[in-house]
Amino acid sequence: MYNHSELKEIIDKALLNLSYNTEAVKLIEPVKYILSIGGKRLRPVMALMACNLFSDKIDNAVLPAAGLEVFHNFTLVHDDIMDQAPVRRNFPTVHNKWDLNQAILSGDVMAFLANECFLQTPANYLLRVFRIFNKAAIEVCTGQQLDMDYEKAAIVSHDEYLRMIELKTAVLIAASLKTGALIGGSDDGNADLLYEFGRNLGLAFQIQDDMLDIWGNTKVFGKAPGGDIVANKKTFPMVKAMEIASGSQLKQLQEQLSLRDNDPEEKVKRIISLYNQLNIREITEKLANEYIDRAFSLLEKVSVEYKRKKELENIASSLIGRDR
């Protein structure tokens, strides 16, 4: 069995050795750059872990797993453009380091490079694996569109928000696990269990991330709380608060969202005070824990020895900050 650090090293090496086959050096320079500036490699590592559950040989899964990481970084390049973000992983974003047109074009080619990685899947798994990836890729883009739509919407429901983060964040984690499992020789039942494990884990992760932006430890995360509040983002706490608030509390929330506040710290304090009155932290934690418990329950049902699941359990526990 491989451990987390060994699998990350395998992925890093595969990304470094990708073949680009293009005469346009400028097209590829931003691709190499975004792939070189770090990242947890969560999706490809989990794909290889899922493969390793069922097979001691993971070679056939390495390039498809690398394709997942290339695709993930493609989404980051385009997200940074849409968000006008200057920094990614403490480095300049691609559009900031080069220019907008270069970032769009180099981001576009990454989608096709991901496809090329998936085409290296063994023939007996290729069609199924490629369809899983393609479906997830379309869903990720759908999630991003919904996120943009909801920025302009006056009201976003609890269910609408959960569906958006499922598409934008959770489905690619889920697809990574199912892809690895199938290449490793899993049957459909175990592959589907791992997909649902990843989907629930991804939902829990995003909900926790929304919560940590407000109530996280500043010393641990290195930033002041409430960045999403200042940006008027419709994260789960805000969506839930707007859903359950009434009377003066709802009016105060609406006023805060409409303000172009020159004192962001005061705005954060006012909205957190309203969240506390509405028990939003407790509601958010409860929902995240429900998804976490469901995820680990699904992992337990995967019919391989527990010791083979230990590394996957560890990375999942690390992702959502829970000891198992």
Image (cartoon, rainbow, N blue to C red):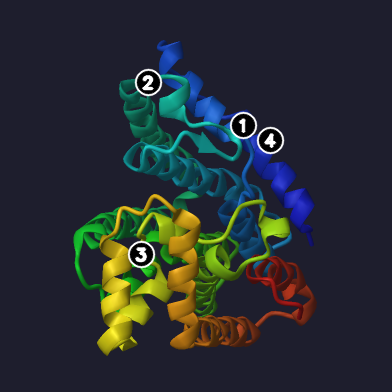
Q: Vertical placement of 255 versus 111: above or below?
A: below
Percent x, y of residue 16: 63, 30
Residue tagged by mark 2?
Answer: 99
State the mark number for residue 167. 3
CA–CA distance in space, label 2 to label 1: 19 Å
Looking at the rendered structure, the secondary structure element under dot 1 is: helix
Percent x, y of residue 282: 54, 87
Percent x, y of residue 112: 37, 35
Q: Nearer the viewer, residue 235 or 225?
A: 225
Tell me the residue at 54%/67% (across/down).
Answer: 214
CA–CA distance in space, label 1 to label 4: 11 Å
Nearest to the eye among marks 1 and 4: give it.
Answer: 1
Disc 2 residue type? Asp
Q: Nearer the viewer, residue 198 or 240?
A: 240
State the mark number for residue 36. 1
CA–CA distance in space, label 3 to label 2: 29 Å
Disc 4 residue type? Lys
Disc 1 residue type? Ser
CA–CA distance in space, label 3 to label 1: 26 Å
Nearest to the eye among marks 2 and 1: give it.
Answer: 2
Nearest to the eye among marks 3 and 2: give it.
Answer: 2
Looking at the rendered structure, the secondary structure element under dot 2 is: loop
Tell me the residue at 55%/71% (across/down).
Answer: 208
